[in-house]
Image (cartoon, grey):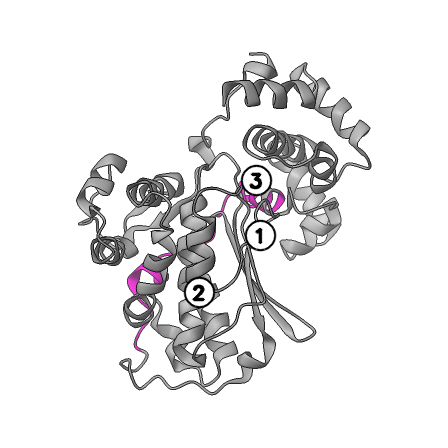
Amino acid sequence: MHASQRPLSPASPACRVTISAAALPLISDVLAGAGLDAPRAFAETGLSVTLAPSHAIPLDRFTTLLENAGRQAGTQACLWTCGRQIAAPALATLFPSGLGETRLGGLLARLLADLQALQEGTTFERQVEGDTCTLAYRIHDPRIWPRSRDAEFTLGFLHAVIERFAGTVPMAELALEHEQDGCRAALARQAGCMPLYGQRLNMLAFPARLLDLAIRTDAFPSAGPTPDHLQQARRSDDPGQRVGEAIRRRVGQGPFSQDDIAADLGLSGRSLRRLLDADGPSFRAMTDEARLDYALWALQRTRLPVGEIAWRLGYTDQGAFARAFRKATGARPSALRKDAGARD
């Protein structure tokens, strides 16, 4: 298929990432509490709220559930509110390990680790720079799209966790990777911050001093054993899949090297080369595939300048990106974007 006619392909079943079904009952409850038709959203998605917590569902199915629910709310940004409402019950039942911490920073670190275990193929990250702390969230595979309501739901949840222990928190920044839509005004009112769209990842920023706050967890039961859905979460034993996932984590975030991927995996450069020599596709082939998926997404689904796309993909300049894209697809980036605009 010519690139100008090529749609975004679904994630390959061989490397499809999953999320635990443990959160589905709580999600059903908060959707209903927001006045949405939860049974309808689940039915449209082909999911059942009665799935066992240990059951793994495709991540793209989960994001579709939230998209279907959000569509019922129109431009009301209901999924941010739903994310906030799920915070208290989720801390008590899904992620209780953080409740043994005495400082907000420790609780957030444990929570992000538990979220990472619950949901594959995703970055949950905390960074502190100067007097600002950022919590970042990003699904690696651009073929899992649309996912705007999932981003709002997740950031709303994280913001509510912070405010539960720190009181009202003025956000320094709220960033979303999807393009601006009709929910901007409603989201700004609810978040107390004007969101930035078309960013590299989904992120909220707040004063870093809050990380040192002592937390009161007397509203919750004492932290108990690790829930089954987290005990059963495991990292893939497939070396090729681990390398491919590490590459997708980096793609779209700027330049990176094979040594960067080795460091991300806790390997030496030599060990990574031996692993790749013994198992499947080359590093270059996996990187090129991930870059192409991101390029197709960015050209078809965003209004990012082609030069920005080239930088995010690690090319030295726009011309190098255009040549690589044309070699892979037979079309210029501008032609694909023009065709995508005509279809819209």
Q: Nearer the viewer, mark 2 or mark 3?
A: 2
Which disc, if any, is residue 230?
A: none
Q: Is 53 on the left-hand or right-hand side of 105? A: left
Magenta span contains residue 33: no
Magenta span contains residue 234: yes
Q: Is 164 on the left-hand or right-hand side of 113? A: left
| Rendered view: 137 above or below 92 | above
Q: Is 121 on the left-hand or right-hand side of 248? A: left
For mark 3, give the secondary structure. Answer: helix
Tag 3: residue type? Answer: Gly
The answer to which of 183 and 57 lies nearer the viewer is 183
Q: Which stretch appears magenta? A: 224-247
Q: In which quadrant is the N terminus drawn? A: top right
Q: Residue at coordinates 56% horizontally, 44% vertically from top-left?
A: 245
Q: Give the quadrant of residue 57.
A: top left
Disc 1/disc 3 C-alpha distance (Å): 35 Å
- N-terminal-most mark, 2 or 1: 2
Question: Can see residue 36?
Answer: yes
The answer to which of 330 and 18 lies nearer the viewer is 330
Tag 2: residue type? Answer: Leu
| Rendered view: 196 above or below 225 | above
**Which residue is labeled 2 in the image?**
158
Q: Nearer the viewer, mark 2 or mark 1?
A: 1
Disc 2/disc 1 C-alpha distance (Å): 17 Å
**Which residue is labeled 3 in the image?**
240
Q: Residue 179, percent across and down?
A: 54, 41
**Which residue is labeled 1 in the image?**
196
